[in-house]
Amino acid sequence: MTRGRPVKVRLNAVILAVRDERPLLLTVAAGDGAVDALPAGVLDADGDRTLELALRRLVREQAGLELGYVEQLYTFGDRGRDPRERVLSVAYLALVGEGCAAPAAAGARGAAWRDGYALFPWEDWREARPAALDRVIGPALRDWASSVAERQERVAINFGLGGSRWDPTRVLERYELLYELGLVAERARDRQERSGTALGQAMALDHRRMVATALGRIRGKLSYRPVVFELLPEAFTLSRLQRVVEALAGMRLHTPNFRRLIERGGLVERTGAMATHTGGRPAELYGFRREVLRERPAPGVGLPRSAP
Amino acid sequence: MTRGRPVKVRLNAVILAVRDERPLLLTVAAGDGAVDALPAGVLDADGDRTLELALRRLVREQAGLELGYVEQLYTFGDRGRDPRERVLSVAYLALVGEGCAAPAAAGARGAAWRDGYALFPWEDWREARPAALDRVIGPALRDWASSVAERQERVAINFGLGGSRWDPTRVLERYELLYELGLVAERARDRQERSGTALGQAMALDHRRMVATALGRIRGKLSYRPVVFELLPEAFTLSRLQRVVEALAGMRLHTPNFRRLIERGGLVERTGAMATHTGGRPAELYGFRREVLRERPAPGVGLPRSAP
DNA sequence: ACAAAAGTGTTCGTCTTACACCCATGC
DNA sequence: GCATGGGTGTAAGACGAACACTTTTGT
């Protein structure tokens, strides 16, 4: 076997929570301090039995946070990802309850919880169709794709423009397209050019790409795995559940149908208790119903195919 | 940052094709020659621009095969995966047409195409419910799970036993459970014990786990991405398409409904040509219809929830 | 003629979506 | 009382599963 220079291996954590109807991301200060970075560290070849345990250790050390749900996201290894050296980064996605994401609960090293949609303003369709799409992105895409069929198709599929629908899960594809077009700050930085348009908040290295991967992954997973419950307390109201799903999906759902889907799908069960001070009528408190895993092969909340 | 011993990085390829209604896997001779291994190699930190390109190069060198569809599968990094040293292995899944998988078309180094279900006999439900399930696996699982609720749940979910349905995508979970129970040869080998039950053909290191990951992934992907077409020629009959899907899914489908699903879903278009010598009435030849990608967010063939 | 595979029609039940409406609390 | 959010009923429609049945070849 040929053997080149050794490659360094790093682990990265995309840690998400939802609080006040906003998806939050745990960040630490980057080396140069100018932008945020993801918690990261190196695998201890002797100490860490598995990659996942290494990640948990690392997040514990850096942010004082004990992770619950963790899944491997993707391994990034392109040359030039890190201008200093060739690194392989194994990225993980972790979900924590909103209790962990208390405003003060940031540990050492400038750890902080950032609004996820500050990174991807074009991904939040809850209030309205994001303004950036029509003001900046749309024109730039049209310009770029003009009279190149393949580009037009790519734009249509990923941004739901030419008769296609907006697919909430294509977060990464959209980010990468915007990167190629030079609409995000990372592109100019990576090429050492003067920066032009800079949509959304930039992050260190390719960390924003990792977060895009994570958001896309969890949006997809919502509909076939009961992952939302990792972000909620033991007991919750259905509307609270709906708000969390909406925050992740970046779109509003039809309340009455959402309730029925969840209840008839057997994902939750009544606890008997009630939530008061809801702003209106008191709401029943529900809990995740584990048995659903036995009953249905792919239990999830299912995003609508059309906007509500 | 703490820095332990450096970790080696390897790439592995799970290359699948379907031929004669059987999923085939490209293997090479393992170091000791006793079992098969997956094509593998090392990333060239200077030469390879991306991991995917490194993988393509590697497969070209080792098996003389030019890959088409490639996707990253998973990164394996547990300690003890390779008894010799701590290695991180980034596994990729590749799909090639049956032309590449010609019986003779194995390159150097003892490359060969193996029947995928020789590795996982319990995964092929096309002819009948696999015999091993009732003869060996069922009793062993019941024994293991007896009077431990969590184990019973895990068995039910993954093997479709206690009121749950068989979920074709849970290939990895099933393999890992059988590993834990000592029903596959790798378990005894890894623990340097005398081997007992040895279901299915073993592979080197944790390569069979990688193949299980790949099979589960592609089974899942069938229903929301048009991946089958990577395994078919440009023009094909609907029944040929059905056979390929069935080979991957490990189950039979209801022919008339399958046809309608595919046609109504807009996944294919008539080519006008006909296939003769089909054994009966000549069949129309179809081709993949690229436009679906614009029209539908998740185009795929959709496996049935119940057996036909 | 008959076997074998291709291909069509129709029915039924379930799941999705949308619309309309009633209920219980705080202020 | 009325605004606000919680909660229910029901009907139209899309979709998947199952059944029966016709068509076109090779032998």
Image (cartoon, coloured by chain):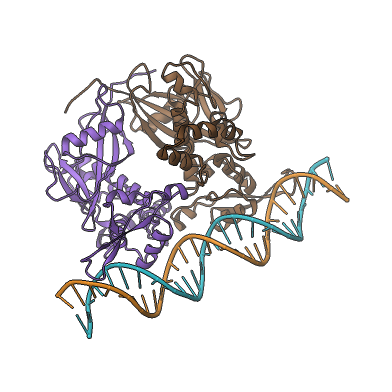
Chain colours: A purple, B brown, C orange, D cyan
Q: Residue A254, image x and y in percent?
A: 36, 66
Residue D8 sits above or below residue A106 on the image: below
In the image, residue A286 sits, relative to residue D8, either above or below, namely above
Res. A304 visible in picture: no
Q: Position of residue A158 (x, y in %)?
A: 37, 53
Q: In this view, does C3 lie to the left or right of D18?
A: right
Q: Which of A135 and A274 is in front in this view?
A: A274
- Classify residue B130 by image quadrant: top right
Location of the N terminus of chain A (image quadrant) = top left
Residue drawn at x 35%, y 55% is A168
Residue at horizontal 50 percent and vertical 47 percent from the top: B226
Where does residue B221 sit, x and y in percent of width and height?
47, 45
Q: Quadrant of residue B77?
A: top left
How many numbered discs, if any?
A: 0
Residue A38 appears anywhere in the view: yes
Residue B191 location (% of width, % of height): 41, 19
In the displayed structure, does residue C11 sit left or right of residue B188? right
The C terminus of chain A, quarter of image: bottom left
